[in-house]
Image: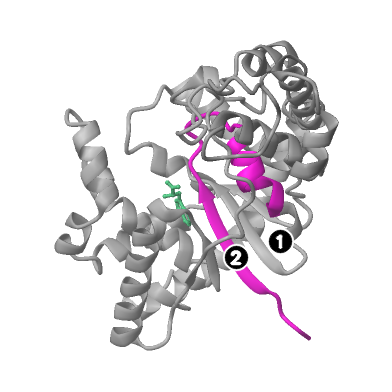
Amino acid sequence: MDEKKVMLSGIQPSGELHLGNYLGAIKNWGARAEEFDCYYFMADLHTLTVRQVPAELRRHTLEQLAIYIACGLDPEKNTLFIQSHVPQHAELGWVLNCYTMFGELSRMTQFKDKSAKHAENINGGLFTYPSLMAADILLYQPDFVPVGEDQKQHVELTRDVAQRFNNLYGETFKIPEPYIPKTGARIMSLNAPDSKMSKSIPEGCVFLMDKPEDIQRKFKRAITDSDTEHCVRYDPQTKPGVANLMSIYAACTGRSFAEIETEFDGQGYGAFKPAVGDAVIEMLRPIREEAQRILADKAYLEQVYRDGAQRAGYVANKTLRKVYKKVGLVAR
Ligand code: TRP
């Protein structure tokens, strides 16, 4: 039998997902399950490295899980779980802490950035975050770890730690490859088209759970450009705002830039901007409704994450037992 390659990714449930996350990445994740055996988990333990409001962390974790399902991650075809529900993460994390060097952890750019940003709370967890992430990954013996640019260094460190452990104790961990996903559209802020859409500029950011009237307002206020031509034409150099709206419209409708130019020929931005807003509203409507439906159905959501934790735990436990035995811990 042809075994599928394994893919794993963790998602920090720290904030709200937006249109840029969806069109740039999440939209394509559902289809991966055809080719790969996929694990996705809400990395709730990782969020504790920065102070959280407990009730919000709980809400974000469940909301994020519901949104991913609504975006097409089918829990029957993917293993979806919550990191803290599989205790092997914390257990292997401890062991790997003892095989990760102080110097290596000190060189992590995310540690340096986050300690600068949270100077009042540079805790041990922030420092050893990459060993926990290595444990997250290595427990499942994945072939691929899809990550963004900012997490590549952590995957490199994971490979080094795995290699070190294998050299000491014999083949234990598969050495995972970072997987640079095919990127979807790169969506920019609606009111600052030279920056990526981000929750740090909320007025230029369309959240997946935004109400239709909020989405329409954000599009009506979107920056177009300052030239006098006032026509819908794709030119990212001189008309970055219009080009961004066209990319969004293209992604929602499947139309080409040429088709969009024809569609709005002779019409100004006054017609174009609300049309993009409507297209986004219609694309997001089923996602929002489905996420709300799932969130309201506590029993279903519970069943998804229990089932996911059970499947993940089975695999994780096999790896952990092997590791414990190799390093000399007495079997239970
Ligand atoms: N550190 C990742 C981030 O901040 C989240 C994460 C935790 C992760 N564990 C992981 C990603 C394991 C991939 C694999 O985005």
User: Where residue 18 appears, x then y in whole percent?
Assistant: 60, 31
- For the point 70% across and 26% down, which residue is it? 231
User: Where residue 70 appears, x then y in whole percent?
Assistant: 75, 38
Where, quadrant-wise, is the N terminus in this rendering?
A: bottom right
| Mark count | 2
Note whether ligand 1 is within 8 Å of mark 2: no
- For the point 24% across and 32% down, which residue is it? 117
- Rounded to the nearest angstrom, the CA distance separating label 2 from label 1 is 9 Å
User: Where residue 104 appears, x then y in whole percent?
Assistant: 20, 63
The mark lying in front, picked from 2 and 1, is 1
Q: Which mark is residue 32?
A: 1
**Crowd tier of the residue under label 2, counting other residues whose Cα lies within 10 Å: few below 14, some 14–19, many 20 or above:** many
Decide if residue 11 is on the left or right side of residue 275. Answer: left
* Amino acid found under the numbered disc labelled 1: Arg
Note whether ligand 1 is within 8 Å of mark 1: no
The quarter of the displayed image where residue 31 is located: bottom right
Give, as a single range, the part of the protein colored magenta. Answer: 1-29
- For the point 32% across and 50% down, which residue is it? 129
Secondary structure found at label 2: strand
The quarter of the displayed image where residue 156 is located: bottom left
Front-most of residues 36 and 283: 283
Secondary structure found at label 1: helix
Where, quadrant-wise, is the C terminus in this rendering?
A: bottom left
Residue that carries the numbered disc 2 in the rendered image: 7
Work out whether mark 2 precedes mark 1 in sequence or the reverse, and give the earlier one: 2
- For the point 74% across and 16% down, which residue is it? 212
